Amino acid sequence: MLELISSGLLSLWLEEAGVDPAALRSPVPPPDAWGMVVPQTDLDANVTIYAYLQSLEGQGVARGNQGIWLQANITALSSHQGLEPRRAASITKLATTLAVLDSLSPDWAIETTVSVRGEVDEDGTLVGELVVSGDRDPFFVYEEAIELGNALERAGIQRIAGSIVVQGDVTLEGEDDADKVATMLRRTWSPKNWTPEIESAYTRMSKGTSRPSIPVRSPRRRSKSNRQGDPEPVVIHSSLSAIGLLKHMNVHSDNVLAQTLADRVGTPEGIAARVAQLARVPATEVQLADGSGLDRGNQISPRAAAAILAAIQRHLWAYGLNLADVLPVFGTDGGTMDERNMPTGAAVKTGTLWDTSTLAGVFPTRDRGLVWFAIFNDGEDRTLKFREQQDTLLRTLEQRWGKAETIPGAIAPQVSPDTSPDTRLGAPARNRIIKTWP
């Protein structure tokens, strides 16, 4: 390949591959080029990576336990054991992200239906049962339950003379016992009974959000109609979209949510095979044991991590979205970005086990355009130090190639609570009222 580059035949080879040769120089390569890798020696990259590894060795960290992959747009710049699978930790969530996007549409959501079995009096009293049924919304939390209660009030239900019945697969804050979920909903819809957890959730919601007040008491009489009939739907609640769920999963590295989403789309073996295919890397470089990264059997090579990022970018680009819509962005998001010090605008995924620290993502530069990277560090009791050194490495590379004046549109978030209010937890727009009472 080096002879190809030096002989001037590279442009012809790229054209035959369907890629504009200008992609090598463009700050933002065309979508079809993402994931394509052209080897090229880069002195700045190699010197920086060598100094990084030498520094680790000076601190007693074995060079052989580290893995690095670095490329600018489609040009591979530097690699240290980049093709060898290593413990991935939460970099595994990148594979889960790609598998979910491959299986589900970006706007896919889970519906939870609230129905009535009984009568609603003129004063808004439901005499009968309020039935809640769903399909295991993986992120049905107190914020969502609070606004669902507000939607029921808007539908005309002011109190319940009867009971709340949970059917199907409904979870609230991770609790899946039907009776406990019913009790939690009853408490959520009665502010005088709020726990500190519910109160805390309310403070995170949009300013001005109402506190639902739907008291539940034992009925003094039975309803006359529909008591034994099918429940009549009143409100249909939609979960966050697939994009919203993935963003939360990656920003907070939510292991439970990651496993729940992975379970919906396949087995670890099936997901690994499909992800390797989509990322265009050998199957040996993607080995999965779960969807979260908690299992030490999750093994991904640094090159594969970068290729998975590119595959996610290719997939999202077709919908007018990009990596920043499903990954935490430094300078914008909290979660795993708290207490980090990366180049502004970097879209990344972190990973941590007690003896492993991983980081993969992309950041913009003035001279090299988009720089894609994966850093896998192994060493006992050094995860905090590894994080500091990873950030320093990225900032050093940014200094060598210049800080981008603006964040390229290719990695600028297109979806946010400001631009898309329904992406907020507890958004009223995700509750559809289908029946009302005066």
Image: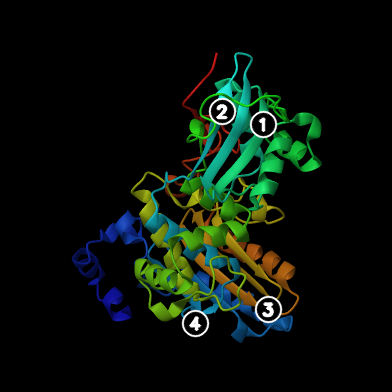
The answer for how far apart the CA atoms under marks 2 and 1 are is 9 Å
**Mark 1 belongs to which amino acid?**
Gly
Name the kind of residue labelled 2 in the image: Gly
Q: Which residue is mark 4?
A: 84
Q: Which residue is mark 2?
A: 118
Residue at disc 3, secondary structure: helix
Residues under labels 1 and 3: Cα distance?
Answer: 65 Å
Are there few (<14), some (14-19), or many (20+) residues within 10 Å of tag 3? Answer: some
Q: Residue at x 44, y 72 (%)?
A: 272
Which image quadrant: the N terminus? bottom left
- The mark closer to the camera, 1 or 3, is 1
Q: Nearer the viewer, mark 3 or mark 4?
A: 4
Element type at mark 4: loop
Residue under the image location 56 percent in, 79 percent down? 297
Q: CA distance from mark 1 to mark 4?
A: 61 Å
Instruction: Check whether the beta carbons of the residues at disc 2 and disc 1 lie within 8 A of each other.
Output: yes
State the residue position of label 1. Answer: 162
Secondary structure beneath dot 2 equals: strand
Q: Which quadrant: the C terminus? A: top right
